[in-house]
Amino acid sequence: MMELNLKPMSKLEQQYSYSHDEAVDAATRCLGHLRGDMGSTGKAFYFTWFDHCGELKTPAFKSEFDDVINALRFDEAYHGILSSRNAMSSYCYKHPECSYGTGVREHGVRIDTEGYSYLLRLNPNPGEYNFYCYCYEKEALDRHLAQQKEPTKPQKKHEMER
């Protein structure tokens, strides 16, 4: 099992835990994102994948992504952050540094591997989508972030976010 380092997202990185237009997707080499919820019980795991630059999805990426998501669901080292809504809520409560701001329900963590960055936006509220995981080629995302003077506005093009 790989070792993952979860760290709070910067304010700028938080902007990339939402969908953008095709030009930003291409510049950041965003492969796509996973959206999910824990269902009415808070213990389910319902999800949908959305391609952004789908041609970048190699078998190696797919395998690594499965490993990352499964570690977040089942490995105690990561607090079961995606195992249940209660576990997610507990993680968010214990890590206020991950909050998107006062009065905002979302929290975010960045997870980097050798080649990829995963920006995981968490929302432990029932009746809403509980997580979004945006997947980027790490080098392209970091290069793009370094060039930004102010955040780009997300475009809600892939789905209606509740």
Image: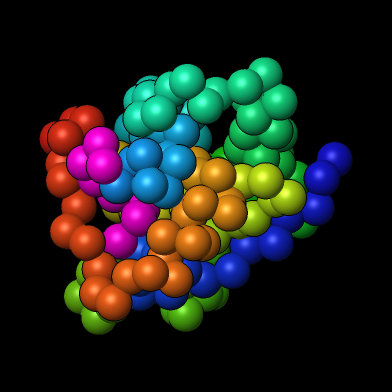
**12 is higher (above) or lower (below) than 54:** below
Q: Which of 139 and 40 is in front in this view?
A: 139
Residue 39: image location, x then y, percent: 36, 31
Which quadrant of the figure has residue 54?
Answer: top left
Q: In this view, does 41 lie to the left or right of 79?
A: left
Residue 140: image location, x then y, percent: 51, 51
Which quadrant of the figure has residue 58?
Answer: top right
Q: Is residue 118 left or right of residue 66?
A: left
Residue at x-position 29% and y-position 47%: 24
Residue 18: image location, x then y, percent: 29, 49
**118 is higher (above) or lower (below) than 11:** above
The structure's colour scheme is rainbow
Q: In which quarter of the image is the C terminus?
A: top left
**32 is higher (above) or lower (below) than 29:** above
Q: Nearer the viewer, residue 132 or 29?
A: 29
Stretch of the chain drawn in magenta:
15-23
Was residue 69 drawn as part of the magenta stretch in this picture?
A: no
Residue at x-position 61% and y-position 46%: 116
Residue at x-position 29% and y-position 77%: 149
Residue at x-position 16% and y-position 35%: 157
Q: Quadrant of the N terminus?
A: top right
Was residue 19 drawn as part of the magenta stretch in this picture?
A: yes
Residue 44: image location, x then y, percent: 47, 29
